[in-house]
Image: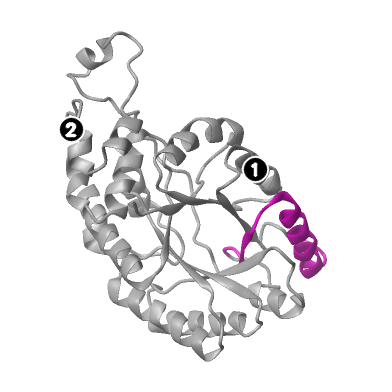
Amino acid sequence: MATCRLELMGVHDYPRHASTVLRRFHKAGILSGFNIPNKKPGEPLLEWARVLLSEFPAVEVTVHYSLKHQRRANPVEALRAWCHEAAAVGVRRVLLVTGPHGPRQDTVKVLNQFGRPVEGVRLGVAFNACLPTEAEREMERKRLVQKLRTGLVEDIWLNTGVDEDMLRSGIAFVKTTCDKLNIAPHIFGSAMLPSEGQLQQMRERPWNGVQFSEEFLSSVEGMGSATSRVLAIFRELGVEPIIESKVKSDMDVLKLNALLNGDPESLEVIEKPSREGHLASQFGSADLASSLEPQKEDGGQADKRCGAQFCPPVRRRWGNGQRRNA
């Protein structure tokens, strides 16, 4: 079964989220790791990491470190001290980003001054292959080369994008550059779970530096088709996917499973009536379907009220989001 990492978007209560939603997600068998984003100053990132590692000791946790939100008099020493704390907690990967409109002491400068790596922690950087103009993409490539030449970068995280040609070109550039520098970082690629709320956000409040095709923005179905092709490229080129969307319900897990396994057609039927056995036939996994079937706590009355179908929770719209500025 195909797997992915999940970026924990908009989570406010990590202990509760871990013991409920994430436990069901983990049970589905499609999880390869969690990412904790750094969206504002003062967030207890490592405390959240402790919660996840306590609940899921075998699952890898990556924590994002934004220089914009972790402003210190000496950002290099602050990052080094924080990485030592992260290693002690059990965090094995750190994604270092400058952040939107971040400080002059950006990722490139901090890496150049960082010196020896912290044992037990892999440092990663962001790379946006789908910036709108060629000039922006060329600058992004130059910055990536500068980061890689420090010898500290072990992971590369691709920003969200659905332009297939740009993604292929960007991934090829990453691999060619790494070959020339004789390094072999792990490559991750971002994608989104199709939903009305996510679609509305990308139409009205898209992230900085991110643009989507007309197909992607046309409908949830178009969003699903475009995302499915992106994930197919990731599978082909050995890029590990990370989902930058809220995954809260059983239906979200089923949608994600369909996408990861190259079955976009199933997205159109997930919310149709799903009597016993129907989910297994649609998604090819009786175990996954049975593990996600809603539990009846009222003698089946819920089925009658919902017309013999699972009633998903009301979709909620996202808050503001930002791209990972490199």
Give whichever of 53, 58 is nearer the camera. Answer: 58
Q: Which residues are magenta?
A: 72-100
Q: Mark on residue 195? A: none
Residue at screen point 54% across, 67% down:
325
Residue at screen point 24% across, 48% down:
220
- Asked if residue 115 can be seen in this view, the reply is yes
Q: Is residue 160 left or right of residue 12?
A: left
Give whichever of 156, 291 is nearer the camera. Answer: 291
The correct choice, above or below, for 158 with respect to 27 in the image is: below
Query: What is the three-letter code of the residue carrying label 1?
Result: Trp
Residue at screen point 77% across, 65% down:
80
Q: Mark on residue 48? A: 1
Quadrant of the rendered structure where residue 326 is? bottom right
**Does the magenta portion include 25?**
no
Point out the tag, 2 or 1, that comes first from the N-terminus.
1
Horizontal and vertical percent position of residue 88:
76, 53
**Does the magenta portion include 79?**
yes
Horizontal and vertical percent position of residue 63:
62, 55
Query: What is the three-letter code of the residue carrying label 2?
Result: His
What sort of colour scheme is used for the picture?
one colour
10 Å crowding of disc 2: few (<14), some (14-19), many (20+): some
SS of the residue under disc 2:
helix
Give whichever of 137, 33 is nearer the camera. Answer: 33
Residue annotated with mark 2 = 278
Residue with the most extreme bottom position:
180
